Image (spheres, grey):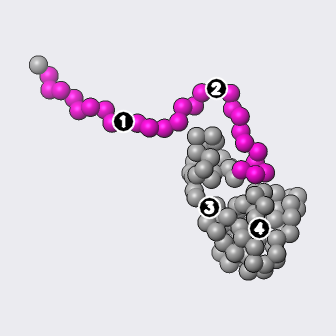
Amino acid sequence: MPPASPPSPKVEGFALSGVSNLPDPLTHAYRKDLADAALAGRVIASHYAEPLNRRLVKDAVLWLADDETSEQIDTLPAGSHLRMLDCSRGWAWGYAPDGRVGYVRAEAIGC
């Protein structure tokens, strides 16, 4: 009689089935490479992160993309908070105080 194999570990996860119904990207932070951990199970991304509260050290424009030729969403005053998910290549990405998602120049939050 062959030796009994160990029980398979229980795998928990999310099923990928049905029609995609992506949340609004203007109010839900997700990209192909990174998404808000609160969106796990709703969007597919390479990585997930919890937003970090960062205070703006100077006034900053909130941009739709990490490019100053993209659409300006708003102007955020110094002292307001950005719930940041990423800071790279000179840009910080996250949620503005009103919940809209966008980019500010990294120096505006000191990262």
**Residue 55, image quadrant:** bottom right
Check contact, mark 3 vs mark 4: CB within 8 A: no
Answer yes or no: is residue 77 visible. Answer: yes
Seen at 64% across and 42% down, the residue is 43
Is 99 one of the magenta-colored residues? no
Badge 3 element: loop
- Labels 1 and 2: the sequence-earlier one: 1
Mark 3, Cα crowd under 10 Å, few <14 / some 14-19 / many 20+, is: some
**Foreground mark, 3 or 4?**
3
Task: Name the residue tied to disc 3.
Answer: 51
- The alpha-carbon separation of the residues under discs 3 and 4 comes to 15 Å
Tell me which amino acid carries mark 3: Pro
Seen at 88% across and 58% down, the residue is 71
Tell me which amino acid carries mark 4: Val
Residue 15 in picture, x, y percent from top left: 54, 31
Residues in magenta, as a range: 2-28
Task: Name the residue tied to disc 4.
Answer: 104
Tell me which amino acid carries mark 1: Lys
Tell me which amino acid carries mark 2: Gly
Check contact, mark 2 vs mark 3: CB within 8 A: no
On residue 10, the disc is: 1
Task: Name the residue tied to disc 2.
Answer: 18
Quarter of the image with the N terminus is top left
- Labels 3 and 1: the sequence-earlier one: 1
Mark 2, Cα crowd under 10 Å, few <14 / some 14-19 / many 20+, is: few
- The alpha-carbon separation of the residues under discs 2 and 3 comes to 28 Å
- The alpha-carbon separation of the residues under discs 4 and 2 comes to 35 Å
**Foreground mark, 4 or 2?**
2
Residue 63 in picture, x, y percent from top left: 82, 62
Badge 2 element: loop
Answer yes or no: is residue 34 visible. Answer: no
